[in-house]
Every structure is written in structure tokens, then in C-alpha cells.
Amino acid sequence: MEAVTAFAHQMRRVNAILHNVAHDLSPDEWMARPGGGQNRLGFMLWHIPASEDWFVHTWIRNVAEVRDCEPWAASVGVNRLGLAFGIGLAEADAIAEAVDPTHMLAYADAYLGEVLAWLATLTAADLDRVPDNRAHLGRHPAYQRTEYLAQVEGMWNDSVGVLLAADIGHARGHLGEARLAKELVRGRTY
């Protein structure tokens, strides 16, 4: 199997697992914390497509994220309430409060459509290219925050292929975390 095809397959799998974990959450479960001082389950799940969106569109392609475009730009919770990472608990809570599972999954599906269309344009040689990832720094004030720059410090010279693999691994790791959090939350409730 060619690498670009494998990346597309993995992106579809991440989306399918995200749907499986999130589709049946009650509002109380969405807002629950699996443990004291931890992110709400809703933020954990929102973080997956939001960070994938950032990874592909901002970091690799230097184009607007799906959540910066209509209809998502007008949607509280999916749009720029904050970064997808490198934020405090209060900011993460505000995102979980502003979005629900149905809306988050629709956003995830919109992102998936965009990324699959882009992947269809790539060749194996494109995966070796190092993107001009510094070009995005002036597009949004959040990209100039110390917290943001600390999170991305080791990625400046990574190739598109390495970045896509890291993105998929990151998403799959959080999906495992979210599945466990869901079980913990349901264990306390039932």
C-alpha cells in the first residue's frame, strides 16, 4: 500500500473511532471529568479534530483551518475560542461548554473531507518535503503565545510524512484516553 493511501485510511479510522466514542454521550458525560483537575471528556474529544485540523491546515499547508471557514467560523465552540492545545483548564472548559457531540462530529466530518481531498493531490515525493511552517505565525495572535511556541518547538524541520504520522499517532492516543475516560465517567454514573 502506498504511504499517502495509508495516511488516508488512518484518517478515516480516526474519524470512525471518534464517532464510536462520542455519538452516545449524554450532556452530563460530555461535561464530566474522569478525575480531579483533568479536562472534561467533551474537550478531550473536541481536541482530536481541532488539533488534526491545525496540524494539516496550519502547520503543513499554511491555509485556514476548517474551523476558520464557514459555516464553522460562526459556530461558537468550533471556531477560535482558543487553541486546540497549550491552553489552560478554564479555556478547555469553555470549549466543552460551547460545543456538543453532534456539532463536534459534524466538524470532524467536514475536516475529514477536506484532508482527504488534499491527500488525494499528494505524491509519495511530497511526503519528504519540509513545509514552510513558520509562515503561519502572523495569522493569529494565538500562534505567538509562549505556550503555543513551547508546544511546537521540536517540529520545525519535520517532513510532511513525519508530521502526518505524528498527527495520526497523536489522535489515536487521545482516542484511547477518551475511551478510558468515558468508561470511568460511566462507571461513576451507573
Image (cartoon, rainbow, N blue to C red):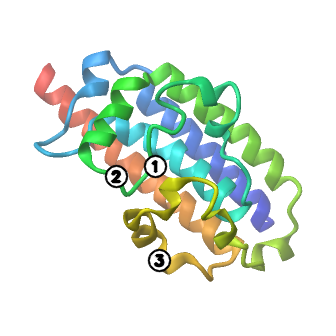
Badge 3 amino acid: Glu
Please report contact status of discs 1 and 2: CB closer than 8 Å, yes or no: yes
Say few, some or many: other residues with alpha carbon within 10 Å of mark 2 (under 14 / 14 to 19 / 20 or more): few
Residue at the spot of label 3: 153
Badge 2 amino acid: Ile
Query: Residue 189, how many percent across, how many down?
Result: 14, 21
Mark sitting earlier along the chain (3/1): 1
Q: CA distance from mark 3 to mark 1?
A: 16 Å
> Which is nearer the eye, 175 or 65?
65
**Which residue lies at the image location 64% right of the left edge and 55% below the top edge?**
139
Badge 1 amino acid: Leu
The label number, if any, that marks residue 83 in the structure image: 1
Query: Residue 136, how many percent across, how many down?
Result: 65, 62
Query: Residue 106, how many percent across, how many down?
Result: 60, 25
Disc 1 is placed on an element classified as loop
Say few, some or many: other residues with alpha carbon within 10 Å of mark 1 (under 14 / 14 to 19 / 20 or more): some
Residue at the spot of label 2: 87
